[in-house]
C-alpha cells in the first residue's frame, strides 16, 4: 500500500471516528503495523463502528468512559488485531441471531417450518440453509394479519399503541390517521381511543386553541 493510500485511508477512518462523540484510542498508527496491518486495522475499525452503531450491543463491551481533570474521555477496550476482529464478529452474530431467530436454526428446522406451514418451494431439497432461511423470511413478509379476528380487547390495545402520539396532535382541516379509514368497524372502535389518549390543538385563523 502506498503512502498516499495510507493517508487517504487514515483520513477516511478519522472522519468516521470524528463523527462519533468519542475517540477510540489507543489504536496503533498504520506505520507501526505489519504488512497486513493496514487491512487488519481497516477491518477492525469497520466492525468496531458497526458494533458501536447498534443500540442493541452494549457499549460497555467496546469502550470505557472515564474522567481526566474534569473532562470526560473514552477509550476502546479492544486492539486492532485478529483476535479483536473475531470477538467483534461474534458480537454481531449474537446480535443478529437475537433479532432474527432463523439465523440460529439448522437447515432441517427451517425446511420443517416451511413444510408445516405448507409453503411449497420447487427444488427445496437442493437449496442451502441460507436459501431456505431467506425463503422462510420472505414467506413471513407475505403473511397477512387478520386484525378483526383478534378479540376486541386485544384490538383496542393495538389501536392505543398505534394511535398514541407523544406530541400534541395539531388538527389541520379534516386530516385523520390512516387507520381510521380502514373500515367502519375499525373507525368506530379506534376513534374513541384516538380522541381519548391524545391532546389536540385546533387552528383558528392565525392562532391555536388548546382544549382544557
Image: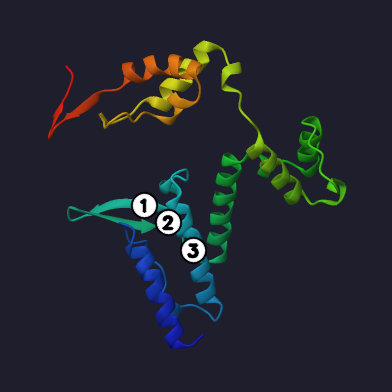
x and y percentages locating residue 79 in the rendered image: 46, 63
Direction from residue 35 to residue 136 in the image, left or right: right
Give whichever of 7, 193 is nearer the camera: 193
Q: List the residue tagged with mark 1.
A: 64
Label 3, secondary structure: give it.
Answer: helix
Hey, which quadrant is residue 118 in on the image? Answer: top right
Judge the density around disc 3: few (<14), some (14-19), many (≥20) Cα neighbours within 10 Å: some
Q: Earlier in the sequence, mark 1 or mark 3?
A: 3
| Farthest-out residue, left | 206
Direction from residue 183 to residue 119 in the image, left or right: right
x and y percentages locating residue 143 in the rendered image: 66, 33
Hey, which quadrant is residue 178 in on the image? Answer: top left
Q: List the residue tagged with mark 2.
A: 77
Label 2, secondary structure: give it.
Answer: loop
Which mark, by number, is residue 46? 3
Q: Earlier in the sequence, mark 1 or mark 2?
A: 1
Badge nearest the viewer, 1 or 3:
3
Residue 40 against residue 205 in the figure, above or below:
below
Query: Is residue 29 among what the camera can see?
Result: no
x and y percentages locating residue 6 in the rendered image: 44, 81
Label 1, secondary structure: give it.
Answer: strand
Direction from residue 167 to residue 158 in the image, left or right: right
Judge the density around disc 2: few (<14), some (14-19), many (≥20) Cα neighbours within 10 Å: some
Amino acid at each position: 500500500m502506498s503512502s498516499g493510500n495510507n493517508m487517504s485511508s487514515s483520513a477516511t477512518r478519522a472522519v468516521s471516528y470524528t463523527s462519533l462523540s468519542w475517540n477510540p484510542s489507543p489504536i496503533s498508527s498504520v506505520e507501526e503495523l505489519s504488512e497486513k496491518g493496514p487491512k487488519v486495522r481497516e477491518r477492525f475499525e469497520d466492525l468496531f463502528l458497526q458494533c458501536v452503531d447498534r443500540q442493541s450491543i452494549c457499549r460497555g463491551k467496546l469502550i470505557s468512559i472515564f474522567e481526566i481533570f474534569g473532562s470526560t474521555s473514552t477509550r476502546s477496550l479492544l486492539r486492532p488485531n485478529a483476535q479483536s476482529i473475531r470477538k467483534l464478529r461474534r458480537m454481531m452474530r449474537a446480535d443478529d441471531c437475537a433479532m432474527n431467530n432463523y439465523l440460529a436454526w439448522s437447515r432441517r428446522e427451517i425446511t420443517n417450518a416451511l413444510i408445516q406451514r405448507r409453503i411449497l418451494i420447487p427444488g427445496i431439497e437442493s437449496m442451502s440453509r441460507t436459501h431456505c432461511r431467506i425463503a422462510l423470511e420472505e414467506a413471513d413478509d407475505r403473511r397477512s394479519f387478520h386484525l378483526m379476528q383478534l378479540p376486541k380487547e386485544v384490538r383496542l390495545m393495538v389501536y392505543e399503541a398505534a394511535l398514541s402520539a407523544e406530541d400534541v396532535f395539531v388538527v389541520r382541516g379534516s386530516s385523520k390517521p390512516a387507520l381510521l379509514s380502514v373500515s367502519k368497524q375499525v373507525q368506530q372502535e379506534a376513534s374513541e381511543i384516538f380522541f381519548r389518549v391524545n391532546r389536540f390543538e385546533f387552528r383558528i385563523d392565525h392562532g391555536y386553541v388548546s382544549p382544557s
